[in-house]
Image: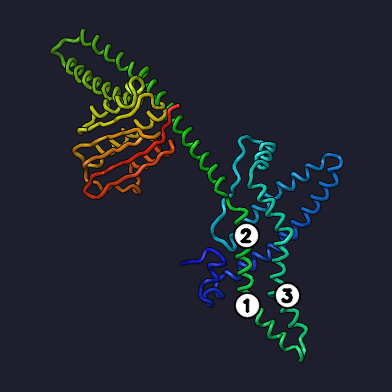
């Protein structure tokens, strides 16, 4: 297995490690750490001195805040340098400000815990880590070089010592680089709470997208009902009036009959589309009645066994209804089933739903099937979905959705 960290590289066979790029990467990591650390010391010393002096006249807070914010830059550079000895990329744990502008950015950074961890790492780095980098490099290369350039006939033991130190330098440098990288990752990697906040933001975004989708669906249904459907009705009345002036045995009468038949078919398809976009029975009578109505119009027999309380949250009812209809559409299109069942229960603030069919099974959830859409709907409600579909069937879609009454 290809190593991804300096320490993993050291665990390889000696020749594999010594002929790899890892010793050189570790040397570059420590060397750049010395240069960057020395520059950071100068900058922070000037900032701290200016802050202390100006604090007397009550404007020193600005340089001090600047030092705190500068630590985020130091941390960003360190995350980039870590790629030399740790191939697992560290994501930026900072969140985007809710508003635009420098003031919002500064306020957001000062409220984040990661900013203060980065400040602690910066202080540790400027106070000790770069000195240790310099010490390791000096011991591995500077000390042997000094001994070898000042040798005489009586100091051959020091020559032997210098040779041993130089031969061991790839391991010395790499081991300290690995330890330093592990310490940096401890400070700079996102913590569970920060990841949890990110996850909550993603889920909130999913919920907003779902709400926007539902609102857009209602708007489309209203536009179709008030626009296209009314125009079709008007067209039907025009054809009926035209028929009054057309002889029954004329060719135009036959064409009118065909046009009326096609218009009737289009009207029925449009009504079915409107009913599917925003079924009135769902708004008027609730989830159970809407699912039963949908099952009654389904091309294969469907057994509906839903024992759910009345007054479920509107968002849950709408999402679960479209989840069921989408799952049933997948059954009709792909399963080859002869019958299906929808079963639902509500227990301990949890809505549990099972959708089964007796089709041929073998559903591959990772092949871009409709299960992905179902999972997205369930995920927007913080629920979970499991699919069992052995070859030969049956297929079971099990859904659990948290649902609490206000």
Horizontal placement of 286 versus 197: left or right? left
How far apart are the two marked residues, 1 and 3, measured between alpha carbons? 14 Å
Q: Residue at x 63, y 54 (%)?
A: 187
Residue beneath label 1, please?
168
Closer mark to the observer between disc 1 and disc 2: 2
> Residue tagged by mark 2?
183
Residue at point 78%, 84% (across, down): 150
User: Pointer 3: what residue?
Assistant: 142
Q: Position of residue 196 (x, y in %)?
A: 53, 44
Q: Secondary structure at mark 2?
A: helix
Q: Image check: 150 left or right of 215? A: right
Is the residue marked by circle 3 packed among few (<14), some (14-19), or many (20+) residues within 10 Å?
some
Measure the alpha-carbon separation of dots 3 and 2: 25 Å
- Tell whether label 2 touches label 1 (CB within 8 Å): no
- Left or right: residue 60 versus residue 319 is right
Mark earlier in primary sequence (1, 3) = 3
Q: How far from the left and from the top, in percent, is residue 28?
A: 64, 66
Which numbered disc flags the more N-terminal residue, 3 or 2? 3
Classify mark 2: residues with Cα within 10 Å, few (<14), some (14-19) or many (20+): few
Residue 230: quadrant of the picture: top left
The kind of secondary structure element at disc 3 is helix
Distance from disc 1 to disc 2, alpha carbons, whole Å, reads 23 Å
């Amino acid at each position: 297995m290809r190593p991804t960290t300096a320490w993993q590289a050291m665990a390889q066979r000696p020749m594999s490690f010594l002929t790899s790029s890892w010793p050189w990467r570790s040397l570059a990591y420590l060397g750049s750490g010395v240069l960057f650390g020395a520059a950071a010391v100068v900058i922070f010393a000037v900032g701290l001195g200016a802050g202390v002096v100006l604090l007397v006249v009550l404007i020193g807070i600005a340089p001090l805040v600047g030092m705190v914010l500068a630590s985020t830059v130091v941390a960003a550079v360190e995350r980039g340098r870590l790629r030399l000895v740790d191939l697992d990329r560290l994501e930026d744990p900072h969140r985007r400000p809710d508003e635009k502008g420098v003031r919002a950015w500064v306020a957001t950074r000062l409220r984040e815990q990661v900013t203060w961890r980065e400040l602690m790492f910066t202080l540790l780095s400027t106070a000790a880590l770069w000195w240790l980098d310099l010490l390791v490099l000096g011991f591995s290369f500077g000390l042997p070089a000094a001994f070898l350039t000042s040798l005489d006939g009586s100091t051959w033991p020091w020559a032997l010592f210098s040779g041993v130190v130089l031969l061991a330098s790839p391991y010395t440098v790499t081991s300290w680089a690995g330890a330093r990288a592990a310490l940096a990752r401890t400070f700079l990697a996102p913590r569970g709470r920060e990841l949890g906040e990110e996850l909550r933001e993603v889920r909130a975004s999913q919920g907003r997208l779902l709400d926007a989708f539902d609102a857009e669906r209602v708007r489309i249904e209203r536009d179709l009902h008030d626009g296209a459907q009314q125009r079709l009705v008007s067209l039907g009345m025009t054809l009926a009036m035209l028929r009054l002036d057309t002889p029954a045995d004329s060719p135009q009468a036959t064409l009118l009959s065909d046009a009326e038949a096609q218009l009737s078919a289009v009207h029925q398809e449009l009504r079915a589309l409107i009913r599917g976009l925003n079924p009135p029975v769902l708004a008027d009578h609730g989830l159970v009645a809407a699912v039963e109505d949908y099952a009654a119009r389904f091309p294969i027999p469907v057994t509906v066994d839903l024992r759910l309380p009345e007054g479920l949250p509107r968002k849950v009812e709408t999402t679960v209804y479209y989840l069921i209809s989408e799952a049933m559409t997948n059954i009709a299109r792909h399963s080859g089933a002869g019958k299906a069942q929808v079963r639902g229960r509500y227990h301990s603030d949890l809505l549990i739903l099972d959708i089964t069919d007796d089709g041929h099974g073998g559903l591959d959830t990772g092949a871009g099937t409709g299960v992905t859409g179902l999972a997205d709907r369930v995920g927007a409600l913080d629920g979970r979905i499991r699919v069992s579909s052995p070859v030969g069937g049956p297929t079971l879609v099990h859904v659990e959705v948290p649902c609490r009454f206000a």
